[in-house]
């Protein structure tokens, strides 16, 4: 097994298989995602070029990302018969994804003509990481007998949308031989243009602008000796990038410039950039090819969606694999993806948080409008470009009635603000750089703390504040009180806000004064002190060690997950939302207390972790892709590596195996799972690798899984880089020669000084 | 129209008609209810003798009142053909209910024999108000041609139950010619016995104990000249009345003693007692026969269910009309029935409240077990004999799925405790007698206030306490915050508790000290002061005058009742319970703000009442029988008597017209509506009559409906009695000669002194 390559020779034409391959083989570059469909596919096969950060709404349907016209389209026919991987003329088909270079390749042999001659179509495709507007497809057509092949290639304007059309009036043109399809979004009239050039140029081609598509048609006489090769360079530009009236010109400019540079140069730049990415983020697992491949694939998924510096973008819950989940950013990013970037690509991690800074006003608007007297920042549960909440109050469809169910994800899942604040603070602790704090991060944190201050109630007889009426990570139990996770996140946020104030008071007192004045918060700091000191967080029971997920949870019916599921009348029936089958039971959707034990792992001993893990694990449905990695990491913490490994594989293989559920109620939720991918990385590096990089320093206390002979990875910490190599008995750390500082590391409990360019090894 | 008589010649045999006539023609005496079924009916026709205060549970079904074997059973046949009002041999049928005497009569003429001769069966039945264990039926059989009639009469042990059998092993016997059927309840093994005697005695009868029934069989040769008349005396006694081992003997004793006294004497005592009842409670409406009859019928319903002194019983929401609503006591009693008794039969009013005193421990248990840290008394939403809550967490069935829906009636409808406390305080203010307060009433009030103290949260930045997460009277919106009705009831309860303390401090200081010590509440009084002063109750908006029903109500979809109902997929679909169609809308089940405006009518001006009435009225479904009278009374308050009259008729005619809904979801809820009946009395006397009897005195400010020529009624106040007579221009009040005191009355705004035995008249 080459863990760098994913491939299949499945040519199944059923819709589910096409959908799953579309996810599995996707490419992306942070700017756009290109689903893993084939050159000849159309909207029926869910071809999608999904644009990051550009959203649109049509009518009353939900807002979602815009898909661009497909500049990668090519269709062949021989003797009037279309050649498609979906047709009955396929002799063989193989498609593969090279993770190292982020290049997708397909090769299909068709049986053509009266003599059943063979025509081989090979294409290689990449979405350039060096020029983010650019997609490149090189096609090679070879035959085993002379024949004339008709080729139609260009930009397919038939766009697959869930709630489209978002570009309702596309127009096709061909200025100076460059194909262009462009249109305006429905809601905000933002221009989207795709330009495409081809090399070598086909002067003899007919331009066939079929309604919304711009295509070239050419007939080529091929012989076995002279295969045909050509390269498509397509560029996508939108009004998010340049002024609306410059969009078309800019798309043409990029396409032509790339055509001028040629395939080899574009490819080389792309591959070089990818090598650099991998050098920072690869994780080597020797002795376990299955885990190795799954983890590399997971890391690949994260790398293709990373926002570029200055973009102010974050990563949606389904990344750029399509329009599912409205292309919205959830807590997934801060809690599950952010740590990977923080440890490997801090600039990308910073960008994720700048997105939250940029959308602070949206969070303020939500606080103002969502509840009575809420202040500060209540971040969107489903965040798009403005930070206003894209989550609807009726977010799950009921398959038995066809009605939408009222859920409280939007209005009661208040831990989201704290998730953001905690990530910003972790960023500061990890990087030691307070630039982000000074450029809006501190303001976000203060506003989040202020939100909890406005949300909390005081219980006089217990002399404590409580966080009431929330949904924790377990979404099957809505509107609960004193949810341990949420309350601790809220308290932590307030503590962090006070720590931010203390930091600024020491280092940037004038900035602090100005900020507090602007926010009108100077008088509120005493309230925050009070809240931090007296906010109730459920503690482990002194006898059992168990933490009650929320007030009253232990009084619920204690039945099995299977018993609950067995009562369903429809397989896609949603188990939560007030009347769901799990609501009166202890069956939970995903890690909740266990998620808390992971997020605040320093605060609980191994025995508490074990007891709660063992209590909650059999009661967890894992109905969310966020669940498995929390169970994996906490199991590693209390030392059950078999448990940890089982859940590690579950989270790492989620997109490779694609066995997840694709419907929640009636809502299609298929696509990739970058949070689970991030969870796989965390479990490998932080769980088995035992890495903890915090304010105090870099700690590595390996807990290598017994099947693994070696675990090796890179780490960034405080702007410096380290290479870590763990074998069953030794831990080796190499400090990058370019490091700026001496670091004293905690290696398996031993304090070791590691100057730039040195390598240290400890036995453990 | 004789407003004292209800009658029908409907002989329709369909189940719904039989069920409705069973409700309409019911008799009761506070001890037992006898549904208005016919002599020959069996369990299929829902014959029910429902016992007050005796409950039983079988398996996992809900607890409900026990129905007794039917001692009123008689069945005739001629030539082997059964004669039944349900059969095809009915020539004519009429049944009637004399409200003045509480006697039910039926007369049916059957076509019998080969020559189609006529046989007339007439029966008269009453449930004795003088001897509460006794039911009496006198039957007369006459023929127009000689024939032999076979008569089977005795005790039918085939009992109709919703969740039975509650007397699983009945045994039948005939000691000394008295028929007996007796058994033990399932849950608590309480004995229930029915004994029956007949006069004149039939020595020739065959005793036919058919399994669970004890019956006499006799063949009588009848001629036109010699009709047959006989009387059945049946007595019901249970282990609630005497020790289990004395139950049968006591039933026999009552039956035999009544047989000895004979029909005339029993009937005379019953009628005399009823005349006395009516003399205290009749309301005369001249000029509106329809309203007169509906109101008399409503008052009759209340009178038949009144508990007898010393019983410690209250009135269930469906009175004694059957087992519906578990025979449970709701807030209906204190809020809707209690005022009628307080103004007309104070002893019965006291008894209703003694029931709450008696069940205080149940309310304490509910507080302890229902929520985290609740203290004091949280009264049962559905209260049976112990005060433990009979309300289930899944209280409504969903007809489309067959599942039970989670409702929060039990755990969140916290206004119930305050409803009880307010009634107890009103009782004191009205009667001027603090005996009830000293005999447990004060303890109830303090414990209810304590409950709210434990339930409330403090909102620091608003410096106020709030009552969160409740259901107000409008049950379609569950788990709302700052519900105006509930919050005001809670605050009032706390104020009342402080008033109780002040009263006791002045008049019974030692009792107060002992009580506070026993409750451990001495240190809590400062908290109650704080709560009373700072508990938030939503106020009318300064611009619009509108009071928001709960926080966020005005942001809900503002759609019509019909639009919501139009979306139902099943006519019995419940509109609330978290996912119901009304939940996201402003459509409410019943008066909520308007209920508050009525309960606290002194605190709001007429304009506020009008504005809120006009806002909420079109948004109210009136899905509860409690709704109409609140709208009627508030309309009278702000002077729109046409509105008031429309809703008065609606509430007064509810049981006469029986057009109410008989299913909530899948749960059968048919039966009588004593709360609506109480609402009819309140609207007539307090609404149109303008009576307000409070701490300050008796105020009468008539608002006579234009169609009415006269409105006359009796009133009790402070132990004295008054007769009130209102014409369109004059108000006359006669003080009973036996009154103990001089009273200065507020008559249409004029202070008038009214010594015992005098009559005063004012023009208005």
Image (cartoon, coloured by chain):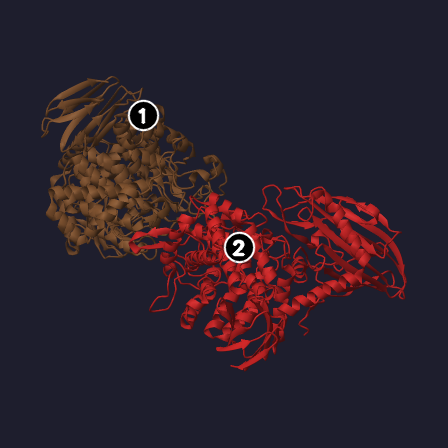
Chain colours: A red, B brown
The answer to whether residue B62 is visible is: yes
Give the vertical position of B312 relative to A701 (above or below).
Answer: above
Q: Residues within 10 Å of mark 1 (few under 14, many from 20)?
A: some
Q: Residue at x 66, y 53 (%)?
A: A50
- Residue B386, given in percent of the width and then of the height, sits at 24, 52
Task: Chain letter for mark 2, please.
Answer: A
- Tell whether A642 sits left or right of A148: left
Query: Which numbered tag is attached to residue B290?
Result: 1
- Residue A427, given in percent of the width and then of the height, sits at 53, 61
Q: Residues within 10 Å of mark 2 (few under 14, many from 20)?
A: some
- When asked about the image quadrant of residue B274, the answer is top left
Give the vertical position of A651 relative to B465 (above or below).
Answer: below
- Tell whether B27 sits left or right of A639: left
Task: Chain letter for mark 1, please.
Answer: B
Please tell me which residue lies in front, A108 or A695: A695
Label 1: which secondary element: helix
Observer-side mark, 2 or 1, equals: 2
């Amino acid at each position: 097994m080459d863990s760098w390559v994913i491939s299949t020779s499945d040519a199944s034409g059923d819709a589910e298989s096409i959908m799953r391959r579309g996810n599995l083989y996707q490419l992306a570059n942070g700017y756009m995602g290109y689903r893993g469909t084939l050159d000849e596919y159309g909207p029926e096969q869910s071809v999608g070029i999904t644009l990051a950060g550009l959203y649109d709404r049509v009518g009353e349907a939900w807002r979602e990302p815009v898909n661009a016209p497909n500049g990668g389209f090519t269709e062949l026919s021989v003797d009037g018969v279309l050649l498609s991987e979906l047709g009955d003329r396929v002799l063989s088909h193989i498609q593969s994804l090279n993770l190292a270079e982020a290049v997708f390749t397909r090769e299909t042999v068709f049986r053509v003509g009266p003599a059943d001659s063979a025509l081989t179509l090979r294409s290689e495709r990449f979405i350039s990481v060096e020029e983010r507007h650019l997609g490149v497809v090189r096609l090679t057509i070879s035959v085993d007998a002379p024949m004339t092949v008709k080729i139609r290639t260009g930009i397919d304007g038939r766009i697959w949308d869930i709630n489209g059309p978002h570009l309702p009036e596309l127009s096709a043109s061909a200025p100076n031989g460059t194909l262009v399809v462009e249109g305006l979004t429905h809601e905000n009239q933002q221009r989207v243009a795709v330009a495409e050039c081809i090399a070598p140029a086909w002067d003899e081609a007919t331009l066939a602008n079929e309604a919304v598509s711009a295509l070239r048609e050419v007939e080529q006489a091929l012989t076995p000796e002279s295969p045909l090769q050509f390269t498509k360079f397509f560029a996508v530009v939108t009004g998010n990038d340049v002024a609306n009236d410059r969009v078309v010109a800019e798309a043409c400019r990029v396409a032509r410039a790339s055509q001028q540079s040629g395939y080899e140069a574009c490819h080389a730049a792309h591959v070089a950039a990818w090598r650099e990415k991998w050098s920072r983020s690869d994780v080597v697992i020797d002795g376990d090819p299955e885990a190795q491949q799954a983890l590399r694939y997971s890391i690949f998924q994260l790398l293709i969606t990373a926002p570029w510096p200055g973009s102010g973008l974050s990563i949606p819950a389904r990344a750029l694999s399509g329009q599912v989940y409205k292309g919205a950013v959830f807590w997934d990013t801060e809690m599950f993806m952010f740590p990977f970037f923080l440890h490997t690509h801090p600039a990308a991690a910073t960008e994720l948080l700048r997105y939250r800074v940029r959308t602070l006003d949206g969070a303020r608007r939500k606080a103002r409008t969502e509840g009575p007297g809420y202040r500060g920042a209540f971040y969107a549960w489903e965040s798009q470009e403005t930070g206003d909440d894209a989550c609807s109050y009726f977010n799950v469809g009921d398959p038995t009635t066809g009605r939408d169910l009222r859920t409280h994800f939007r209005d009661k899942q208040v831990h989201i603000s704290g998730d953001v604040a905690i990530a910003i603070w972790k960023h500061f602790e990890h990087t030691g750089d307070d630039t982000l704090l000074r450029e809006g991060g501190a303001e976000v944190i203060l506003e989040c703390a202020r939100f909890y201050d406005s949300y909390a109630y005081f219980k006089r007889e217990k002399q404590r504040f409580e966080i009431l009426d929330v949904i924790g990570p377990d979404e099957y139990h809505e509107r609960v009180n004193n949810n341990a996770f949420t309350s601790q996140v809220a308290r932590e946020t307030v503590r962090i806000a006070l720590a931010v104030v203390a930091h600024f008071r020491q280092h940037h007192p004038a900035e602090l004064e100005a900020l507090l004045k602007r926010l009108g918060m100077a008088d509120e700091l005493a309230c925050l002190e009070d809240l931090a000191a007296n906010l109730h967080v459920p503690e482990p029971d002194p006898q059992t060690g168990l933490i009650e997920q929320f007030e009253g949870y232990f009084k619920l019916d204690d039945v099995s997950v299977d018993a609950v599921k067995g009562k369903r009348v429809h397989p896609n029936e949603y188990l939560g939302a007030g009347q769901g089958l799990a609501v009166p039971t202890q069956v939970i959707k995903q890690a909740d207390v266990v998620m808390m034990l992971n997020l605040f792992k320093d605060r609980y001993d191994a025995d508490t972790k074990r007891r709660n893990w063992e209590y909650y694990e059999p009661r967890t449905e894992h109905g969310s892709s966020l669940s498995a990695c929390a169970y994996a990491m906490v199991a590693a913490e209390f030392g059950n590596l078999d448990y940890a490994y089982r859940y590690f594989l579950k989270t790492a293989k989620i997109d490779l195996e694609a066995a997840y559920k694709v419907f929640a109620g009636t809502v299609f939720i298929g696509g990739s799972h970058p949070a689970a991918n991030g969870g796989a990385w965390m479990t490998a590096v932080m769980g088995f690798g035992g890495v903890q990089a915090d304010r105090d320093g870099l700690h590595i206390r390996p807990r290598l899984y017994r099947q693994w002979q070696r675990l090796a990875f890179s780490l960034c910490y405080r702007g410096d880089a380290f290479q870590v190599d763990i074998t069953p008995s030794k831990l080796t750390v190499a400090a990058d020669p370019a490091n700026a500082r001496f670091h004293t590391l905690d290696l398996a409990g031993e304090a070791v000084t590691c100057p730039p360019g040195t390598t240290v090894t400890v036995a453990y």
